[in-house]
Image (cartoon, coloured by chain):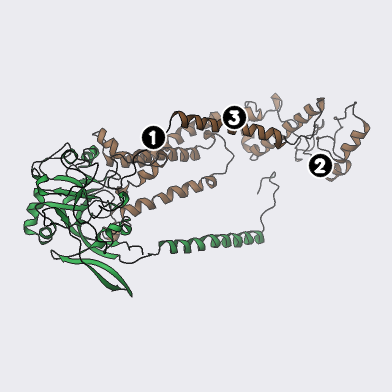
Amino acid sequence: MDDPYDQYPEDTDRRRFVKGVVGAGALTGVVAPAASMIDSLTAPPGAGGGPTDYMGIEKTGGPAPRGMPQIPLEYDDEGNLKGIWPEVEMQQVGGQTVPIAEMELGGKLYSTTWYQYCGSQNNPAIEPDADLDNTIRYTANPAYDWQSNQVEAGDPVRAEHFSDYDGWGNVIGESGIGKPAKVTWRSTELEPRDRIPVQLIRSPLIEEAAKDDEWLEASTVDGFIAIHNQCTHFCCVPGYKDPGQTDAMAYGAGDSIYCQCHQSVYDPFTIIEQDFIALPRSD
Amino acid sequence: MNENTNTNDDRTAAETAEEAELRTDGGEASETSRSSSELRTDGGEPSDERGPSSELRTDGGAITPADDDSPSFRERKERTDGLSRLTYEYFERSRREDQVLRDDSDYVERDVLGFPAWPHEMIRNLSITSFFVGVILFVSATMPPPLEAPANPTSTPAVILPDWYLYWSFGILKTQALNLELAVLGGQTIATDRTFAVLLHGPIIVMLFLVPFLNKGSARRPVEQPFWSAVGVFGVILSFTLSLLAIKNLMAARIPIWTSHMQLWLSFVLPFIGATIAYAVLKSMREGYMYDLNRRYYRLRPPR
């Protein structure tokens, strides 16, 4: 203000006061509707979610918050590999009758809410009462040479396709740890966008671990383990010994499941009990 | 105060009378305004005899001191209002010189405010529009884009990146090593790595919003304000290092000694190093550069 060339008058207290009131009013007018809009947008619209304990593979690196859930397996009557889907019951939850698919399996409570994250909660394949084909089937355009050469997309997975599982290997990681395949589950009748990505591995390590573990004994067969293959970080589909993912080696993930998006690493041979907040299915 | 120097002989008496009503040519002030204020801002002719030293001179007179009159460094330092005063005098002088040129010229000014929208502006705009529409049609006809296969949600491409201008944001998502396990939280992190990385966008976006308010100075060259230039250099380098962080897995796969950990720390250390160097260089350049700049602008003479 001691600049003699500045000829503007000073702000009066009254002017500053009015400015403050107007500013505060404008701020309130913006913030209040925005807050109520965010509140209504983020309110859970459906039912059937909440805190969930699940069995899944361990996350060993990267920004993902937790491991990916496992899909329990069994053989059907024809010897094809099949994912277990629990019987559906109608239960009263919070005054609403909702279908819930859960069962006791290997000493744990297996529920289909395990897969309700990353938008899968709205996938028709994850609806508890959806009557779908539980057979594990090969996908089209797999990452593995053996899969594109020896089997067709849509074929059911059989143990004889994996007879060389204790010696199989490719350019990624060590050989003999496990033979992988890209498969889907409950997705035959669905649009491509609704198909469930599943990583299947048949491994001698799993076969060994299942001998003295109640859960693994109930959820794996002949060393086959299936993982719901959606990264818990931002929902990419990771790979296991994917020959396109040479950067997995730089992260010490040659024998692990590696997500190429943000370098999350999961160890598919360490299955632990974990928990997360399952997202509710939309109505 | 001074004589009217603007009167041209070829002007009619009517024009002169009209001008007396509305003077915009920086000519002689009317009797009333002259008596009401001593402050002349119309770029009038400087008077021969100098007023008392306390009087405010705004007519740009004597902006360039005579050789024997040019101030020493000490005298310049004592003038605290030097820059604003010099600026003011400089503009007043320019205005006066313009006015003199205008008065001397025989160019007749007309009140032309712009061109009519039709046809001038419309024809020009239509021709420009047609040109670019033509380019779009030509490019799309000669190089039709391929129709790719539909997206497959059951597999993610091996190299997955956003558009290049979002690499910095993608790089921030890979900063989980910065999400420290705090002793006060019992070895827990404040938020999950995922939430933390998203929240880390906040400070950067807030900084971008603050840019117009950070420094409202009139400097137009980095040397004039080394500190704020260094802040800018920090931001530029950070945007590059964060973008490189987005492709850290590709770099790690191709350069064996280049670990992700090294790259993460370099991403945040390099901006500081760059900013420090920029500050040091600009600061040392400033003395000489500013002198030269002032000399050009204000026609100062070197000190005795």
Query: Where A89 falls versus A251 (above or below)?
Result: below
Q: Which chain is green?
A: A
x and y, in percent, of residue A167 in the image: 8, 41
x and y, in percent, of residue B242 in the image: 37, 41
Q: Residues within 10 Å of mark 2 (few under 14, many from 20)?
A: few
Residue in view at x 80 percent, y 35 percent: B26
Q: Which residue is mark 2?
A: B38
Circles 3 and 2: CB atoms closer than 8 Å = no
x and y, in percent, of residue B280 in the image: 45, 34
User: Closest to the observer: A168 or B60?
Assistant: A168
Q: Distance from label 2 to label 1 (Cα)?
A: 76 Å
Q: Secondary structure at mark 3?
A: helix
In this view, the mark in front (2 or 1)? 1
Q: Which residue is mark 3?
A: B293
Amino acid type, callout 3: Leu
Q: Which residue is mark 1?
A: B146
Q: Which chain is brown?
A: B
User: Closest to the observer: A100 or B95?
Assistant: A100
Examine the rendering and report whether any part of residue A234 can be seen: no
Q: Quadrant of the C terminus of chain A?
A: bottom left
Q: Are marks 2 and 1 on the same chain?
A: yes
Disc with the residue nearer the chain's start (2 vs 1): 2
x and y, in percent, of residue A266 in the image: 21, 49
